[in-house]
Image: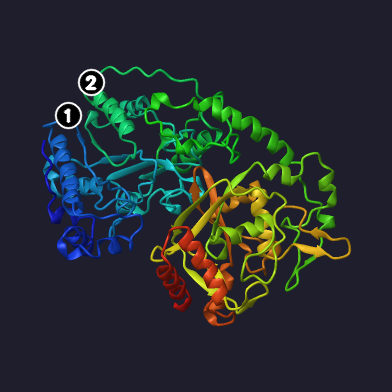
Amino acid sequence: MKAKEAKEKYIASVHTPNHIKLIRDISSKEYDYRRNKTARKFNSIYFNEGSSESAFLAAGSVIEVAEKVAAGELSSAIALVRPPGHHAEHNEPMGFCLFNNVAIAANYLLNERPDLGINKILIVDWDVHHGNGTQKMFYSDPRVLFFSVHRFDYGSFYPCEGDASHCFIGEGAGEGYNINVPWEHAMGDPLGGCCITPDGYALLLTKLLGFAKGRIVMALEGGYNLKSIANSLCACTKVLLGDNFTYNSPRMQPFESTWRVIQMVRDELKAYWPVLSSKLPDNVPLRSAPSYIEPYASSGSESDVEDVSELPDAISSVNVTQVVDDVLSKHITMLKLDEDNLATKNTSSDSVQAQDDGPVVASTRIYDLPFTWRSALSKVYVWYASFGSNMWKPRFLCYIEGGKVDGMSISCFGSHDTSPPRGTMWKTVPHRLFFGRSSTPCWGTGGVAFLNPEINYNDESYVCMYKITLEQFNDVLFQENRLVKDNSEDGKLESPSSPLIGLSEIESVSSNKALHLEPIKDSWYSNVLHLGEEDGLPILTMTCPSTAVAQHKSGELPLAPPSETYSATLIKGLVEGKQLDANEAANYISSAAARSL
């Protein structure tokens, strides 16, 4: 059937008038010179001259096929539409989604066509991302059972919202009618993060045929690999057409976390769905979660392979990683803090007391172990995201190799591992850049850069990301917080003998988005933020805690524009990183310095 535009009154069942007007007008000549600027106001949204027509056609087409299936004119249907819809919120587009196509169609059947007798609808969202918009639209509606299986990564995977957790089950009359199955990590696929083959999708769809007498409407909602989309959609189309489907299970074990998440979901919902009270099989062979360790130099996520059949054997690569992880875990468990010997470390400006509940200084006996924390963390990779002077690579390398660049009054000590970053890339993050404090020993009079820990999608700050080891990240953290000292008596450097950020802290910051390091809580950069993931590795940065932001707001701590030399370093980073030209970079910095908190 040909595509058909949705009427605005049906779209208005889930979206506000202002939202509808924006999407209706965004492709008009009126927006030719401000279309991109308008898009930047939203989270991961892009507009062009065809956006308006496409959005209305996508929503209308899903309505059309849903109506025909509900009326019995079709046994099932597929809506081949773009843009997708499940991220679109009630009042704004989001995540490539302009209108929430499926929500509009569901509302149409329930509220506009009571004559069709549709009283219950199951929405199954198997996109890798959580369907945040769809969930909110039916959160208190018992007529719609929303089921989303997605990567969650403790809240760090897009759309990075806590309501994708299994604990969010609906409210009011809709309590128990919202089911989230949140995977904790990627599952071996170097392209999309989850190893779902065309046969895998066909199997999922086959299981759904037992519901609603097989009356199914499929809406194409995403996918970035055209060959993979084609193969998977073809497999699902064959299922709906009645082709016999035989699933040949590969020799693959589920992750331990997968089984655990399924049990958590069942426990959360068994009071509402007694069928979930039954016990899961306890003889299923499981494998451990993949670690952040990189056994190979190349990154699978950069693969050019498109055909799923051409992918490398996911099992063998996971097993190789697991062998390394088991060895690492064994030694990490040996790194017990000797709490009786925790000491106080004094910096030149602050006195930082090590607390019993935080690792800063371990007993020197740790070095008697055959496998020190430095050896362990030198095999773990992370992305360090810089928003200040370290955006200029020569300045950042001072923290790795030692030394200083023009404008710096003090040399850096460098890292124990002087290897250069394994990769560099740029991103923008939804955090506010500001300049605080009034002077530093390194840069003299003037403020230095901080990121507000709070997420605000109206803010956009540049970060230059360096792929370094977790050992190097700790050394940068030590130097930023002035925990490294030059012992003038013997010429040796003193630095904390245990890490501030280890594997357990990585898990904590990934789950909670931020980790205020209690042992150095009074230091300027004592708050580690988790900004997401790239290539399966966590993106970390260091900034001030929220308490310091409050002090800056009240005037208890000063806000101050950066010095000329400090500003020049940031400008060099932005220009040489090809993010902005010199004038744009200068305006970016002066604007951040001029805005109040």
Q: Mark 1, residues whose alpha carbon is within 10 Å: few (<14), some, or many (≥20)?
A: some
Question: Left or right: where does residue 237 sit relative to residue 380?
Answer: left
User: Residue 503, image x and y in percent?
Assistant: 64, 46
Residue at 25 percent across and 19 percent down: it is 243
Quadrant in the picture for residue 123: top left
Quadrant in the picture for residue 410: bottom right
Type of amino acid under label 2: Gly
Residue at 58 percent across and 34 percent down: it is 296
Question: Left or right: where does residue 285 sit relative to residue 412?
Answer: left
- For this orientation, the residue located farthest to the right is 489
Question: From the image, which quarter does the N terminus lie in?
Answer: top left
User: Residue 150, image x and y in percent?
Assistant: 41, 41
For label 1, the residue is: 75
Q: Nearer the viewer, residue 347 or 357?
A: 347
For label 2, the residue is: 242
Compared to 589, does 88 lie above or below? above
Q: Do we see residue 515 in this rendering?
A: no
Residue at 64 percent across and 64 percent down: it is 526
User: Residue 21, image x and y in percent?
Assistant: 18, 62
